[in-house]
Image (spheres, rainbow, N blue to C red):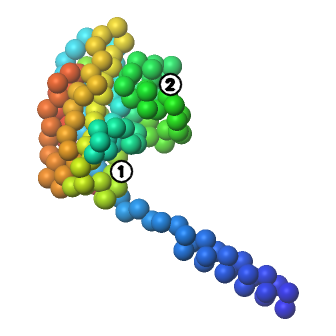
Amino acid sequence: MKAIKTLLVLGVLAISTLSFTTVTESTSYKCMIQMINYSGESAYVVISLINPEGEYEKTLYIQGDDEEWYHDISEWWKFYGKKRTNIDAITGATIAGGARSISVIDIEDSKIDAGYSIRFETAVEDQEYYTKDVEFPLTSESVKSKKEGSGFIRYVRLMPN
């Protein structure tokens, strides 16, 4: 009898905990980054969610897993460097000149058509840093499109996964 009461109490606790959990719907997108041909070290690329006020809200993905160089992506570092959230699950290798990289990023559905943007920043050792190599509003159309870069990125293409 005591075991049944304990199980009942645990069940009620589990259900009440779930009722306070909010589920955020998100969609996975394949994100292809095609780099321009350049010589030198491989590029670090940071993909960020930018809120309607133009401020960083979330880091979506990082091409480059050596934290020693993150401060070179200076605008993003001002945001990330203060919080230092765990980004191990959203990092990959740097991208060489002329190379192509495909990763998967998750974007909350509520951010689409709501004034948010996605930003791609690039930095290469002993070369330039582009704060807005690619940046565009997150709309129903743009998450299925190709966007040209202005620095090390030739273009970015997002495709719902």
x and y, in percent, of residue 129 in the image: 30, 18
Query: Which amino acid is tagged 2?
Result: Glu
Q: Is residue 83 above or below residue 66?
A: below
Q: Is residue 48 above or below residue 116?
A: above
| Residue sitting at the far right | 2
For the residues labelled 2 and 1, the Cα–Cα distance comes to 22 Å
Task: Please tell me whether mark 1 sits on a helix, a strand or a loop.
Answer: strand
Q: In this view of the protein, can residue 48 be seen by the observer?
A: no
Query: Which amino acid is tagged 1?
Result: Asp
At 17% across and 24% down in the image, what residue appears?
Answer: 150
Quarter placement of the C terminus: bottom left
At 46% across and 28% down in the image, what residue appears?
Answer: 65
Q: Which residue is mark 2?
A: 67
Q: Say few, some or many: other residues with alpha carbon within 10 Å of mark 2 (under 14 / 14 to 19 / 20 or more).
A: few
x and y, in percent, of residue 135 in the image: 22, 35
User: Residue 42 is drawn in which quadrant?
Assistant: top left
Task: Please tell me whether mark 2 sits on a helix, a strand or a loop.
Answer: helix
Mark carried by residue 106: 1
At 34% across and 8% down in the image, what residue appears?
Answer: 126
Q: Is there CB contact under 8 Å for labels 2 and 1?
A: no
**Image position of 20 (left or right of 149):** right
